[in-house]
Image (tube, grey):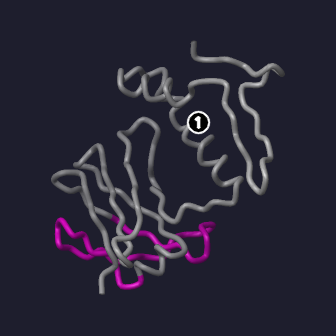
Amino acid sequence: QWSTPFGSGALSQSVAVGAGRVVALGLYCAEAYYAGERRGDERYGAAASDFERFVRDVVASAGVNTPVGVIEAKPDEPLIHLRWGLSGRVPVLFVINEEPRRAVTLQLTGEWARAADHGLRDLIANTTFVAGAASAPEPTDAVTIALPPSPWGVHVLVPAE
């Protein structure tokens, strides 16, 4: 059972709750997406970017902006996972590339663009990467960081100081 429409027949509904919203889905879209990915089923490859776009659009419509993104991601390529947060007061960005031999370019905005003012240092490779200006029509504070392939497909980045 992959799809269970609501009484109205809709597969998704957005309902205001207090100062926020609840987005309810009457289908197992993420499970179908990941099941197809795990099996390498090419039928899911074409829709993979649609699911990711849907999630991104729901989050963006709530006014949430992600400060870190992958510029050249393509739906038919292995995934790049981004995780960011703080270690004490130091911003830390984990970049996990399912294809270690692939370079990746990130776009940073807001606090992460400011954190990259003097570049980002990879704690694993002990290398500093310098930020460059993003091209229009990106947010005006956006910068990019180009990361080369890494032996394990992992970069752990902190502000270079």
Q: How many marks?
A: 1
Q: Is residue 134 above or below residue 12?
A: below
Q: Residues within 10 Å of mark 1 (few under 14, many from 20)?
A: some
Indicate the quadrant where residue 93 lies. Answer: bottom left
Taking 39 as reference, is 141 left or right? right
Q: Helix or strand or loop: what does disc 1 sit on? A: helix
For the point 49% across and 26% down, which residue is it?
A: 31
Name the main secondary structure of what is drawn in magenta.
loop
Taking 20 as reference, is 132 left or right? left
Residue 125 drawn in magenta: yes
Give the camera-side residue of 48 and 34: 34
Taking 109 as reference, is 73 left or right? left
Amino acid type shown at disc 1: Asp
The image shows residue 46 at horizontal and vertical percentages of: 51, 29
For the point 72% across and 25% down, which residue is it?
A: 11
Residue 123 drawn in magenta: yes
Give the camera-side residue of 15 and 84: 15
- Reading the image, the residue beneath label 1 is 50
For the point 46% across and 38% down, which residue is it?
A: 75
Give the camera-side residue of 11 and 152: 11
Indicate the quadrant where residue 15 lies. Answer: top right
Q: Is residue 44 above or below residue 1?
A: below
For the point 25% across and 76% down, which residue is it?
A: 128
Taking 149 as reference, is 9 left or right? right
From the image, which quarter does the C terminus lie in?
A: bottom left
Magenta segment, which residues? 117-146
The image shows residue 127 at horizontal and vertical percentages of: 20, 73
Q: Residue furthest top?
A: 1
The image shows residue 118 at horizontal and vertical percentages of: 36, 85
Q: Is residue 147 above or below residue 47?
A: below
